Image (cartoon, helix red, strand yellow):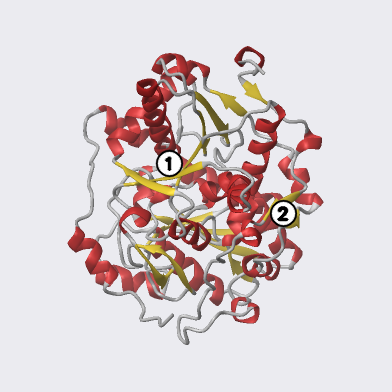
């Protein structure tokens, strides 16, 4: 099919929406390592996790054999409010770059939360409601997850308590107010409201916080409140499972027009968006049905893939959550106050970590100013103001397209546009005023954080 016959936006019919989530782990030859009890270092069973997580979500977290898990009708009905999301051919960006590459992006910002996070938020709220819970606790970095979860909890009539990383709480007041509009309570983290928060503040006075800090506070609150459980917007395999709707829709849209991508690119913080986007493509790659170059893009200020160690580590700063084998900078690593708030997590999803260790995907880290240069260009030519997180993928997509210009290769590039940046204007202001910091942690800083890794014998 010629380029002229491919529309700017490829929309699917409702009938083409996924009816089941795809569990990539079922096809993996090397399964991700199990979660371990932080005290005994033994694999965690479902009953040990039940005091923290919802029962059905625990089943999904531990299931690495079932390839497809049916999406409940109530969740599919909610999805129809904003899904299927469009797959967009970036004709204007291609023209601006004068590249022979064909560029597509899956746009996940066409809902009120402004990002892909709603795909898992509505699922987790649904299972909490089905279990008869009063409410849930969570953390949020840049605020996309907190916004999405507050919407989902409002829909199902659940209480929602959000611990927002302090630097984002201060930089993104409007996203905070959206959460409150949907009925959520929002607390800057670390706070004096929890034991772990008080401990972190005593050890790091004046800290701007991290996702690891906020997770610890949210878990503590969930375990102390009757009828509450903790839910998470990234990192866990259950979240990546829900986000597989992104990749499933993307593949269906591409197959509809006979398009096979050469390169698939996603931003990487904890791994939910990246994992969801690449899932069906990686499945084909593992089964030797097709081959793709898959690239994870992370901020150079928090480079867990590119500079971390592949070991067991705590998922949170307070060291109360299960241990996960992942690429990590150390649970005590406090990232700089970079503007890609949603990517400021010390570790990476265990499934993606295993895939990276097996050489099935690549990882690249990029500096903030390079990211915002790409974001600004994209906004000017494609008409969408991208989130800082999404702009990491845009940066590398542009870089790959320019390589095609140099070589004359007509490669097809697909990247995930995870959301919009209309609540991130503080970051854009810093960039435009020349005040953006390109801080990169030193080897000594990373080594110091890694010294606190748990001693786990494998």
Give x and y (percent) for residue 425: 38, 33
**Do we see residue 219 in this rendering?**
yes
Please name whichever residue, 52 or 180, is drawn nearer the observer in this view of the structure. 52
Left or right relative to 175: residue 13: right
Provide the secondary structure element on which disc 2 rests: helix
Considering every residue shown, the one lying at the far front of the view is 288
Labels 1 and 2: the sequence-earlier one:
2
Residue drawn at x 58%, y 26% as measured from the top left: 88
Instruction: Quadrant for residue 17, please give it.
Output: top right
Instruction: Quadrant for residue 199, please give it.
Output: bottom left
**Do we see residue 182 in this rendering?**
no
Q: Which mark is residue 156?
A: 2
Q: Which residue is mark 1?
A: 389
Instruction: Quadrant for residue 123, please give it.
Output: bottom right
Count of labels shown? 2
Residue drawn at x 62%, y 43% as measured from the top left: 247
Please name whichever residue, 151 or 316, is drawn nearer the observer in this view of the structure. 316
Please tell me whether residue 175 is drawn above or below residue 149 in the rendered image.
Answer: above
Give x and y (percent) for residue 280: 63, 47
Q: Is the N terminus in the top left, top right, bottom left or bottom right quadrant?
A: top right
Left or right relative to 246: residue 13: right
Q: Which mark is residue 59?
A: none
Q: Are marks 1 and 2 in contact (CB under 8 Å)?
A: no
Residue drawn at x 62%, y 75% as measured from the top left: 226
Please tell me whether residue 57 is drawn above or below residue 388 in the rendered image.
Answer: below
Please name whichever residue, 189 or 100, is drawn nearer the observer in this view of the structure. 100
Q: Is the C terminus in the top left, top right, bottom left or bottom right quadrant?
A: bottom left
Give x and y (percent) for residue 417: 51, 35
């Amino acid at each position: 099919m010629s380029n002229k016959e491919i529309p700017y936006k490829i929309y699917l019919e409702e009938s083409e929406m996924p009816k089941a989530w795809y569990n990539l782990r079922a096809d993996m030859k090397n399964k991700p390592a199990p979660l371990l009890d932080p005290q005994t270092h033994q694999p965690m069973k479902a009953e040990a996790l039940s005091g923290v997580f919802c029962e059905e979500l625990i089943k999904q977290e531990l299931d690495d054999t079932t390839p497809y898990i049916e999406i409940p009708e109530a969740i599919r009905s909610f999805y129809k409010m904003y899904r299927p999301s469009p797959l967009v051919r970036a004709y204007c960006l291609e023209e601006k770059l004068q590249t022979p590459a064909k560029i597509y992006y899956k746009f996940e910002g066409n809902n009120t939360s402004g990002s892909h996070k709603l795909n898992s938020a509505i699922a987790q709220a649904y299972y909490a409601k089905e279990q008869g819970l009063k409410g849930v606790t969570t953390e949020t970095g840049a605020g996309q997850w907190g916004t999405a979860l507050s919407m989902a909890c409002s829909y199902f009539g659940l209480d929602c308590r959000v611990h927002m990383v302090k630097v984002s709480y201060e930089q993104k007041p409007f996203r905070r107010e959206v959460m409150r509009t949907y009925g959520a309570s929002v607390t800057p983290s670390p706070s004096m409201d929890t034991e772990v928060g008080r401990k972190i503040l005593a050890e790091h006075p004046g800290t701007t916080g991290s996702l690891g800090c906020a997770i610890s506070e949210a878990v503590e609150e969930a375990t102390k409140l009757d009828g509450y459980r903790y839910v998470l917007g990234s990192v866990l395999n259950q979240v990546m499972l829900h986000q597989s709707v992104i990749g499933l829709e993307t593949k269906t849209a591409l197959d509809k027009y006979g398009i096979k991508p050469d390169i698939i690119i996603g931003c990487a913080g904890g791994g939910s968006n990246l994992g969801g986007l690449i899932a069906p493509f990686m499945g084909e790659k593992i089964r030797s049905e097709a081959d793709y170059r898959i690239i994870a893009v992370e901020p150079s200020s928090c480079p867990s893939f590119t500079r971390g160690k592949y070991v067991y580590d705590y998922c949170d700063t307070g060291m109360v959550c299960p241990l996960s084998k992942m690429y990590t900078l150390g649970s005590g690593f406090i990232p700089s106050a970079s503007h890609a708030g949603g990517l400021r997590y010390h570790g990476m999803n265990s499934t993606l970590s295993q895939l990276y260790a097996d050489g099935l995907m690549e990882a690249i880290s990029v500096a903030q100013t390079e990211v915002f240069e790409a974001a600004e260009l994209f906004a000017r030519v494609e008409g969408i103001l991208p989130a800082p997180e999404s702009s990491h993928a845009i940066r590398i997509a542009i870089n790959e397209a320019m390589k095609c210009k140099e070589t004359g290769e007509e490669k097809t590039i697909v990247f995930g546009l995870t959301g919009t940046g209309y609540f991130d204007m503080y970051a854009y202001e810093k960039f435009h005023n020349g005040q953006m910091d390109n801080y990169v942690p030193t080897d000594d800083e990373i080594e110091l954080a890694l010294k606190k890794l748990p001693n786990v014998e494998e």
